[in-house]
Image (tube, coloured by chain):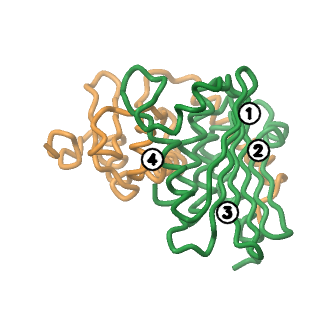
Amino acid sequence: MKSLKELEQIKQKTLDAVNLRKERTGGTRVVVGMATCGIAAGARPVLLAFLEEVKNRNLKDVSVSQTGCIGVCRLEPMVEITRPGEDKVTYVNMSADKVKRVIAEHVVNGQVVTEYTIGAAQ
Amino acid sequence: MEDISLHLLDLAQNSISAGANLVEISIREDREKDHKWVQISDNGKGMDEEQVNKVYDPFYTTRTTRKVGLGIPMFKASAEASGGKLEMISQKGKGTTLLALFIDSHIDCLPLGKMEETIAALIFMNPEVDFVYTHENNCRQFLLDTRQIREVIGEVNIADPEIVNWITIYIKEGLEELYGGV
């Protein structure tokens, strides 16, 4: 059972990690579309899957955030990923399973998962 | 929307767009009466009477980027599909409250869905906003108040992945207990 005491321990653990995170700037940005269209299409598990992967892999220079409607509601859930110094890549029809691959191949290793991108979906 | 928790995730974002820094979500399940009450209240900028009357219209929105506003009309449709209803009280400058009734046993009543994911996502997306989540099932109650969490974690960001993960599991376990540990 989770307790507030355990939360206290997590606090201690994260304080050091957070300090590390603050020192780095210009990391990879992950943006998930979380408007009504995105939520209805399944953006919530996608957002939480990114968060889970960032936590499990202890990725210090990756920031996950949300935005409103990206503009192509039929292709939601959509995710935009920008690695430092590279062009933005837009992924469409995302799912929690696809997130794992995108994190491993694109965010960590710099190889865009072309088959999931908006270009492949047209 | 597939379930009530997804509606709540969407509607709470309206509260935050309205400038709220406190959003209260409460669910009250009454098995005997076959009622599921879902309430979301905020201290945002509220609406005047004219806006309240227009808000059920899917082609009304205050946004300028698009011409549709589907969140509230879809929530109303979901409640009514189960034989329930949606009521809204809003006061300019004070905030807005949405109260929906779902008739639990109706074949078209949406399931509740993963409330722990909705609350965790809301906290992660809006670390500067406080959330109070209460859930009553018959006589048992579960409560999560981000102000209490902040007291424990001090200067640590509530949106830190470790904290959000803790919150998700804390709610999940709390709800399992609420339903008798099924």
The reply to whether the C-beta atoms of the residues labelled 1 and 2 are less than 8 Å apart is yes
| Secondary structure at numbered mark 1 | strand
Would you place residue B28 above or below residue B19 in this image?
A: below
Task: Report the residue at 46% width, 28% height from top.
Answer: B61
Separation of residues labelled 1 and 4 (CA atoms)? 21 Å
Separation of residues labelled 2 and 3 (CA atoms)? 15 Å
User: Which amino acid type is shown beneath numbered disc 2?
Assistant: Val
User: Which amino acid type is shown beneath numbered disc 1?
Assistant: Leu
In the foreground, A61 or A29 = A29
The residue beneath circle 3 is: B172
Separation of residues labelled 3 and 4 (CA atoms)? 20 Å
Residue A30 visible to the viewer: no
The reply to whether the C-beta atoms of the residues labelled 3 and 4 are less than 8 Å apart is no
Q: Colour of chain A?
A: orange
Quick one: label 2, few (<14), some, or many (20+) residues within 10 Å?
some
User: Which amino acid type is shown beneath numbered disc 4?
Assistant: Ile
| Secondary structure at numbered mark 2 | strand
Task: Report the residue at 56% width, 46% height from top.
Answer: B9
Q: Colour of chain B?
A: green
Q: Quadrant of the N terminus of chain A?
A: bottom right
The residue beneath circle 1 is: B22
Residue B23 visible to the viewer: yes
Separation of residues labelled 2 and 4 (CA atoms)? 21 Å
